[in-house]
Image (cartoon, rainbow, N blue to C red):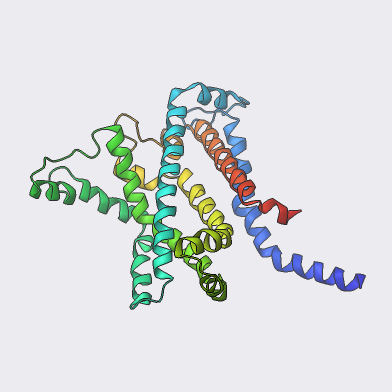
Amino acid sequence: MGRIEYREEKFAYGMLSPMLLFVIVFIIIPVLGTLWISLHQDVTFIPTHPFVGLRNYITILRQGGFWSALFVTVSFSIVSVTLETLLGLTFALILNEEIRGRGILRAIVLIPWAVPTIISAKTWQLMYNYSYGLFNWALGHLGLGAVNWFGTPLSAFFAIVLADVWKTTPFMTLLLLAGLQAIPSDTYEAAIIDGASMFQRFLHITLPLLKPVLIVAVTLRTIDALRVFGIIYVLTGGGPGGATTSISLLAFNYYNLGDYGMGSAISILTFLTVLGFTVVYLKIGRFQEGLK
């Protein structure tokens, strides 16, 4: 029995080795490299890059720009992921029903997610345009005045949230729909026989059984939202006045200036922020019990 278990364990590690190699080469080594650079004064126009320890981190944490970017990033993540979860769950519940054209509707819903982020952001930028954008054209026909969608911090914030919700709600829909289809139909049939209403079935059957998938979906979307860059870079560039600058965009600005030490330090802080949210979600989902 010992030899069999050893062979099975060896086979398992053999099957996992390509993935472990990928993680080491493309994730662990780059993260360690970024951490090492963040401990140096790595500026391209300086001949030497001296070791400065935690000075880059101290400088960043003392800057109001970082905390403003962190606030924008966390606010964006909370608002966008909440809306995407509610809409995704609604669409998943509808697409899970036996309705005509369900296959076509599922394909149509996935189109926004299939569109590259930059193309999607440029499309929304055209629709938000003050002079000839679709939204101001519609407001003009309704007898209302044009709106400068990127003119104030609040309007610019919700402009990027709306564009992001349109783009990534299909991702939530797809994951939640897969979770709904894994719920046994006889569970609902038994509840109907017992006289449970639609709301009671949703509250006591759908949500509890969908919770693991829901937690995974929200975790994946939150990780992605906390790293938001492309849609903000295209739509607002961090404006007006830096009011929509995310921490990823802030790091990019330092990289763009040739200050790789500061940019790497912000990247590490972004990594720690994402890690913190992930740990919280795992505790909420109690997935750590399965790892013991």
Quadrant position of residue 272: top right
Q: Is residue 27 above or below residue 198?
A: above
Residue 20 shows in this picture: yes
Q: Residue most toward the right?
A: 2
The quadrant of the image that shows the N terminus is: bottom right
Residue 258 shows in this picture: no
Report whether 117 appears left or right of 50: left
Q: Is residue 189 above or below residue 73?
A: below
Q: Residue most toward the front?
A: 195
Report whether 26 appears left or right of 7: left
- Exactly how many numbered labels are in the figure? 0
Residue drawn where x is 13% and y is 46% of the image = 139
Task: Name the one closer to the observer, 141 or 252.
Answer: 141
Give x and y (percent) for residue 36: 62, 36
Residue drawn where x is 12% and y is 49% of the image = 137
Give x and y (percent) for residue 90: 40, 60
Residue drawn where x is 49% and y is 48% of the image = 222
Residue drawn where x is 19% and y is 45% of the image = 129
Give x and y (percent) for residue 21: 67, 59
Report whether 213 appears left or right of 144: right
